[in-house]
Image (cartoon, helix red, strand yellow):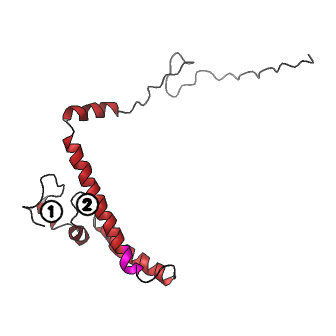
Amino acid sequence: MTGANRPAWATIPVAEERFRPLYARLLGLRFVNPGGVLCFLFFEGTIALAVLLALAELVTWWAVLVLPAVVAAMVKLNDMVAAIVVRSAALVPEQERDRFRRQMEPAVGRAQVEWISHSVTGVVITADPVPPARRADPSD
């Protein structure tokens, strides 16, 4: 893939493309940027897992070929979904993005507590034991 064909919204600069792992370059990942260790686990790790499963006779030896291919397909599918999400987010106007950010702000520490007129973090209001409730006994 050359720099001229790359869309403007791709997240990996063309200058850094040659430093990416071979696994990511062969799959043509644009939005998912796995590092070297993750690419090792995606490819060699799935081969080792498939070999262990085949040696334990839990799967056939075809799994050694199929499992890395299935993992590669899932990684590419994840990259395609990320591309769709980025494109759809770019279509949302800035005003809507600001409104969404305001709505999603966490409201930590804003809970209303009716039985305490004031609250200070870490201060115990009272430590008096509560007397046990008397049961209404008809024999009294």
Query: Which quadrant of the structure image shows residue 1?
Result: bottom left
Q: Is residue 34 above or below residue 23?
A: above
In the picture shown, does residue 12 fall above or below 25?
above
Residue 111 makes an appearance in the image: yes
Q: Which mark is residue 33?
A: 2
Q: Is residue 110 above or below residue 85?
A: above
Relative horizontal placement of residue 112, taking residue 137 as reference (left or right): left
In which quarter of the view is residue 102 placed? Answer: top left
Q: Position of residue 12 (x, y in %)?
A: 17, 58
The crowd level at tag 1 (other Cα within 10 Å; few <14, some 14-19, many 20+) is few
| Quadrant hosting residue 39 | bottom left
Q: Residue at x 12, y 59 (%)?
A: 6
How far apart are labels 2 and 1 at the CA level?
A: 11 Å
Q: Classify 91 as above or below 63.
A: above
Query: Looking at numbered disc 1 in the image, what kind of residue is underneath it?
Result: Glu
Q: Which residue is mark 1?
A: 16
Position of residue 19 measured from the top left corner of the image (x, y, whole percent)? 18, 67
Q: Is residue 74 magenta?
A: no
* Residue occupying the point 42% across, 31% down: 108
Magenta region, residue range? 60-67
Regarding mark 1 in the picture, which secondary structure is present there?
A: helix
Kind of residue at disc 2: Asn
Of tags 2 and 1, the one toward the viewer is 2
Quick check: can you spot residue 41? no
Magenta run includes residue 66:
yes
Q: Find residue 43 and report its horizontal and vertical position in percent.
A: 33, 73
In what element is the residue under mark 2? loop
Mark 2 or mark 1, earlier in chain: 1
Look at 93% across and 18% down and name the residue there: 139
From the viewer's side, name the closer residue of 40 and 78: 78
